[in-house]
Image: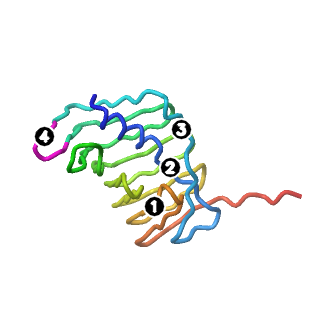
Amino acid sequence: MPAALRALFLTLALVPIAGLPVVAQTSIELKGLRQDTSLPVEVTSDSLSVDQGSGQATFAGNVKVTQGEMTISAGTARIEYLPDGTGVSRVFLDGRVMFASPTDAAEADAAVYTIASGEVVMTGDVLLTQGQTTISGNRLVYDLDAGTGSMEGRVQTVFVPGKANP
């Protein structure tokens, strides 16, 4: 696997999943998911095509990326390289995309991860889940560096309030 692809999937494994506050709001705080980036990354799919001319590679069919306890699944994952070929620019995921760990999950119809800005945009029936808390909407934009995000489009949340400590 080319070094750029390996770096991409190591970076994808760091994507934080929903770390939701107890009170749902359009702006949300996301906690980072701790991940050991020294662990091997495994990518499986039904096929892989690489187009050196356009600077893109596409994993298609039952795409699954794993690193440690983190799993990313999608129908397709299209990798767009920087114009000079020195790294990855963006990753386009389609086909009911899911980021999951043993305790957290984020899913949507599609996602775009822009490496340089650290921005992930998930669109289409977005659902974030952490324990018994869920928040849904049409579009989630979050900043990996700041750990903040916003949900747009008929936002709904379900949470179970905890008991206060005496």
Please name the residue shown 34% across and 61% down the image: 123
Q: Amino acid at mark 2?
A: Pro
Question: Please, what secondary structure does the residue beneath circle 2 have?
Answer: loop
> Height in image: 66 above or below 31?
above
Mark-to-mark CA distance, 4 and 2: 30 Å
Residue 41 falls left or right of residue 2: right
Residue linked to disc 1: 142
Question: Is 52 a magenta residue?
Answer: yes
Q: Which residue is identified by label 3?
A: 35
Q: Amino acid at mark 1?
A: Tyr
Q: Is residue 55 above or below residue 161?
A: above
Badge 1: residue crowd in 10 Å (few <14, some 14–19, many ≥20): many
Residue topped by disc 4: 51
Disc 4 is placed on an element classified as strand
Q: Is residue 1 left or right of residue 143?
A: left
Distance from label 2 to label 1 (Cα)?
9 Å
The residue that disc 2 covers is 16
Counting residues from the start of the chain, the first of labels 1 and 4 encountered is 4
**Which kind of residue does numbered mark 4 sit on?**
Asp
Task: Identify the residue shown where x is 38% and y is 66%.
Answer: 138
Residue 163, position in %: x, y? 78, 58
Mark nearer the N terminus (4 vs 3): 3
